[in-house]
Amino acid sequence: MSALLEVDAVDVSYGDAQALFGLSVTVAEGETLAVIGANGAGKSTLLKTVAGVVRPRRGDVRLDGASLSGVPAHRRVGRGIAMSPEGRRLFPSLTVEENLLVGAHSRRPGPWALDAVYALFPLVAERRARSAANLSGGEQQAVAIGRALMANPRLLLLDEVSLGLAPVVVAQLYAALPQITAQGTTVLVVEQDVHQALAVADRVQCLLEGRTVLEGPADRVDTAALSAAYFGVDA
Amino acid sequence: MSWVNAVVQGILLGGLYALVAAGLSLVFGVMRIVNLAHGVLAVLAAFGAYVLGDTLGLHPFLALLVVVPVMAAVGYGLQRGLLNRALGGGELAPLLVTFGLAVVLQNALLEAFSADSRRLDLGSLGTASIPVTDGLAVGVFPLLAAVTGVVVIAAIGQFLARTATGRAMRATSDDRDAAALMGIDGRHLYGVATAIALATVAIAGVFLGARSTFDPAAGGTTLIFAFEAVVIGGLGSLWGTLLGGVVLGVAQAVGAAVDPAYGVLAGHVVFLVVLATRPRGLLPSAVTA
Amino acid sequence: MTAVAQRPAAVRVRRGGRAAWAGAGLAVVVVAVLGYLPLLTTRGTQVQLVGLFSLVVLGTMWNLLAGYGGMVSIGQQAYIGIGGYGLVYLASTVGVDPFLAVPVAAVVCAVVAWPISYLAFRLAGGYFAIGTWVIAEVVRLLVTQVDALGAGSGASLTGFAGLEPTYRIAYVYWMSLGIVVLVVGGVYLLMRSRLGLALTAIRDEPTAAGSLGVAVTRAKRLVYVAAAAGCGLAGAMVVANTLRVQPGSAFSVDYSAMMIFIVVIGGIGTIEGPIIGALVFYALQDSLADLGNWYLVVVGVVAIAVTLLAPRGLWGLTRGRVELFPTGYRTGSR
Ligand SMILES: Nc1ncnc2c1ncn2[C@@H]1O[C@H](COP(=O)(O)OP(=O)(O)OP(=O)(O)O)[C@@H](O)[C@H]1O
Ligand SMILES: [Mg+2]
């Protein structure tokens, strides 16, 4: 498998505070990688760096071998990177359907359109005419994922799907993931819920304070070592 | 009968005030800045039509075909070149820059055209009128101007509600960063919003310049009237703005019918009363656009 | 969170230091020299300097509003006009001594501004700016209706009758210098007070300041009223200097343009900025007078450029190194 995304030794800072330290992440085409880590580990920062919301001070991000440095966030969508951001960030003054249509703004061709998203999340179809401001957390997350899919991404970035949701709802949302990857979409998912992450991913990479502390195939990772890495204590 | 006449004239004038106000609202709705040069830009468009009439003999309506696209281009350039930069400079910067721009444009116009009052010549259309009853006749041009105002406002509303670009504008107004994640280029979109605002304000400026006299200093009152229409109607509501423009126009016309010196003052007073008693306007809207 | 661990071990809070003492000393010397000037210079020079003083007061007031209070007003001419008209009415019609009428006119401005603030504060940002302008227009239109104030043609200040011009001009000069000291010193002390801290908090983070319990609106109202009084003083000063008031010029929005340019070019949010801005504006006004309206075009372009390229203005170019009138607290680790 060839690498679709290569994050190569990036340093990222917010003002004086450095969040990522020479971090490297590689995701192969068609693969699902879960990035896990405690609060403040730098998971969201990693996704924002890939999406182009923050710029690395050092290092490079490549998609299909081509550097993305200097490519602003809005152009990266056209190249096939779409993100469901932390906290969902739906557009509250738009309806559910309008939110989805905004997701298709870059007009990338592909399998995902309104019908396909509605088929994937029937609940969203029922709420299509409703204002996005009046949705439950689970519904919002489904819309946020659907909105990202509308861009027909090659690489889908999902930031904390489980945030603030009941386990049943989280399980329902993740149940949709196989249908997404079946289209050949590569997925980079960030989770605090380690079990959920291990269940859906091919590979897992654990961050601590902006650095990788452990990585490996999801089905063979040693859970004791993983929880030690997660909390930053020696196993 | 003169009262009825005043009210009718006021309603028709209100359509034009609302048209100036629509651009102000649109820009505020999309990027949360108030363009203090908005009024002067209307006057600039009127002078543009004046020059075209003076040199090429173009009727103001034909001049619109040139002035409107030019002003739209100016708007796009202004936003990309100047205002987008100001947006990054904190809350005060856009106000300082647009105010500075207003002063620059007004004084440049003053140098170019002197302080003399001018009026765009409509030819026979300027005097044509439709008799309604014995004492009441409605001017064809004021009617046309008001209808244009309503049509343009409705078109802006449809644009925001139905088109992909309009949708992207509403999304950007909600959350610019999230919109960028959807592939929306905020800087370009802001440029488009200002281009539309200046295209509409150009129409309004030319109609206002044909309706009554104007001079380089008229930008201030034009901005004030637009602002009053917005606040009377309720921030963020296009139809509210139309209502606000009509209320303002009627107040001015009725005030002027009492005593010509009271026209503008009556409009201000109605504005202040609305501000004191209904600070969210007559037609408050939950949605901003 | 790791940020906690990065806090420096020892923090020393200090204000000013040697530069501040130098600043105070410099201010005393400058005021003393200026105070001595009427004994050395012609009446014409004094009249001109009063014009400069009015610019300093206006700039300082606008800076108080926008730079410290976060309120962009383009309607301060309401109070400039009320100050000027107040002086003329009190001195020429009521018969109050003009030098007493000036502070009274400023008090009138404050009294008028207080209820007006309740209306104006219903608007925010750019809409607040236009709202203040509308209020100034209303005041202008009302004044033009009053025959006792000379209606559209204005009125003259006759209260100085009996005073020899040489003395009159010198007294007006000293009064104006006193007003400058009062206004600049007053803003300086205000910004060093608790209220100043609250204002800085509002400016830097309005929502946080609100939730921290700082009475945001109260602080802003105080600033608005104080700025109205200051602009009233400036308006009265201008009329005492020129002996004439007219609605068109006293309530002209050009005053707002001037105030904004002075503050932006000098450096917004500093005590020194408006003074430097006023000096620059005054010098430009004199040397570019031949340009007519192009002069305002030039000043406007400069103000736009400064806002975008050097938002801290001329004084900002030195700031960080010198601070003659420090209002904020500086922290430094030992
Ligand atoms: N906008 C910001 N400004 C300043 N610092 C930030 C900002 N966003 C994140 N940080 C800091 O960067 C570090 C990494 O944050 P990040 O949001 O990437 O963590 P995370 O792993 O996503 O955490 P969580 O699980 O809580 O979402 C943290 O120390 C955080 O405080
Ligand atoms: Mg996160």
Image (cartoon, coloured by chain):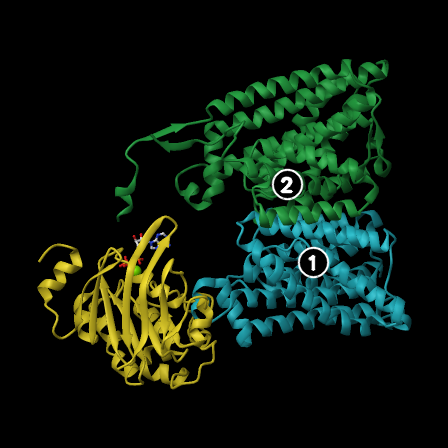
Chain colours: A yellow, B cyan, C green
B287 over B165 or under it: above or below: above
Residue C295 placement: quadrant: top right
Q: Nearest the camera: C198 or C292?
A: C292
Residue C126 can be seen, yes or no = no
CB of mark 2 within 8 Å of CB of mark 1? no
* Amino acid on which the number 1 mark rests in the picture: Val
Which subunit holds the residue at mark 2?
A: C
| Disc number placed over residue B247 in the picture, else none | 1
- Estimate the x, y position of residue C110 in percent, counting from the top left: 63, 30
Q: Which residue is drawn at the image coordinates 24% and 55% (left, top)?
A: A209
A141 over C257 or under it: above or below: below
Q: Which residue is drawn at the image coordinates 43% and 31% (left, top)?
A: C329
Disc 1 residue crowd, few under 14, some 14–19, many 20+, Cα 10 Å: many
Q: Quadrant of the C terminus of chain A?
A: bottom left
- Estimate the x, y position of residue A133 in percent, counting from the top left: 41, 65
Q: Quadrant of the N terminus of chain A?
A: bottom left
B55 over B275 or under it: above or below: below
